[in-house]
Image (cartoon, helix red, strand yellow):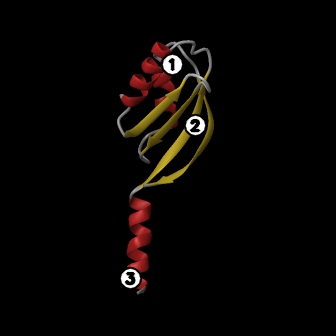
Amino acid sequence: MKTLILFLSLCTFIFASNISIIKVEKMHCPLCTIAVKKAIKKVDGVEKVSVKLNTKKATVIYDDKVKLADILAAIKTTSYEGVVLSTSKYTK
């Protein structure tokens, strides 16, 4: 039983990802959100991206090897600035 619990704990840790919510001000049209989403998706290790125009927020799920600085740099390539609002562990 202890082995099973240890194995499940290890699997949870191995398959754990991070989720961050990033504020992206000054987006004003649907094309802006598409550009930001495409830029973030190009970062190696990003698993899922959602960008909402009405809230001006991007929700990004990514693995542990990704640095937030890389995601923010990707957003900056679209001429927008991103500000991290929150980051937490995300388990699948």
Tell me how many marks there are.
3
Expressed as whole percent of the image width and height from the top left, the position of residue 81 reads 58, 20
Label 3 or label 2, whichever lies nearer to me, is 2
Q: Residues within 10 Å of mark 1 (few under 14, many from 20)?
A: some
Name the amino acid, label 1: Lys
Query: How far is disc 3 from disc 1 in space, using C-alphas?
Result: 46 Å
Which residue is more in the foreground, 73 or 53?
53
Name the amino acid, label 3: Thr
User: Which residue is under mark 2?
Assistant: 21
Q: Does label 2 or label 1 sit earlier along the sequence? A: 2
Q: Residues within 10 Å of mark 2 (few under 14, many from 20)?
A: some
User: Which residue is under mark 3?
Assistant: 3
Expressed as whole percent of the image width and height from the top left, the position of residue 20 reads 55, 40
Q: SS class of the residue under badge 3?
A: helix
Query: How far is disc 2 from disc 1 in space, using C-alphas?
Result: 16 Å
- Residue 29 vs 12, above or below: the answer is above
Give me the residue at 49% from left, 47% from top.
18
